[in-house]
Image (spheres, helix red, strand yellow):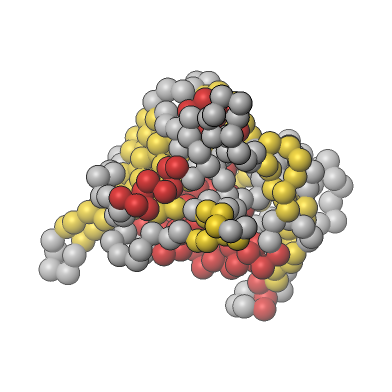
Amino acid sequence: MMTSSGVEHAPSIHQHTLPRSTQWRVAELRRRQTDVLMVHPAEADSGVRFVRHGAEPEAGTILAHWDAVVDTRSGIVLGNTHGMTLRGAIPLLAALRIAGVDNAVVEVHGSRISAQVSDFDFYLGMLADVGVQAQAAARRLLCVTDTVEVRDRFGFATLSPATEFRACVNMTTTQPGGSTGTAYATLLSDFTEPHAGSVTLDGSRAEQLVPAGSAGVPRLLREICALPEPLRATLVEMTGLLALAGAPVAAYVRGHNSGPRLYQALLQAVMERRAISYTTVDAHRARQHITAHAVADAAIKSGCRNDVC
């Protein structure tokens, strides 16, 4: 679409929810009968919230929000003012973000849900099977406006201003024989999930994927499953923790030998310092003069490796 001034106008990016409810029963795979969760559609601008099955709505609702984190000692635990807690939400939140789901109600049957990397695969598959439904509201966006860094004795994590979402992690690895090396991976998003990396050709969508190869080649966010362990596990944790911001994040995220506690501390520091601004994907793209897939297309065409952390 062209504006009156002759400038290309990209189509509006809307929020998404599920078209219908979907259920995942972990007992069908390998665990307890009580490990059941359902994901339901939700209204626009409501975000993701967890609801305990059988509890009163107010007491049993936990928001997927950064200030709902009540414990980080043995995994990220979310909670509310009524004492209700939930452990294990991060892989599911990562799957919702990568699937492009902005608004959902997750019904749980206990105080924890399965949180292994393999569970992330099942969550992503479950969401792919049910699909998504566009909503009238524009997709919200959180822009990082200042660089923030947190450290511990193992590594560090930083959030810096950027026009897109770019997540880069590296970690020290031990090779056979005792030598050490560095593994790294980079993920990109232009905030157009679930259609990121697709282009319209003659009314149909054609997929653009990064060729298989080195984990260091920048990949689209939804290609996270193609990454090797433990880089993939680290990026699942990073994506799920940043989903607690309540909207996709425009930032360059860098982690070195980092884990979930460090990412949670990073997000909390950014929010408490107010190093952020809120907008919509449409307004951000117009301001930056970028089209919906410009960032992803550039990475795909170049296949460059100059984003090593």
Q: Residue at x 85, y 45 (%)?
A: 57
Task: Tell which of 158 and 268 is nearer to you.
Answer: 158
Q: Position of residue 64 (x, y in %)?
A: 65, 43
Above or below for 149 versus 84: above
If the image is split into quadrants, where does the N terminus sit?
Answer: top right
Q: Point out residue 23 in the picture as x, y percentages from the top left corner.
A: 74, 66
Residue 272 at least partly seen: no
Residue 39 sits in quarter: bottom right
Q: Residue at x 68, y 61 (%)?
A: 131
In the rendered image, the quadrant that contains the C terminus is top left
What is the x, y in percent for residue 201? Answer: 55, 57
**Is residue 245 positioned above or below 4 on the image?**
below
- Is 201 or 190 nearer to us in this picture? 201
Q: Is residue 179 visible?
A: yes
Which percent across, then down, holds residue 267?
A: 50, 34
Figure check: 160 above or below 111: above
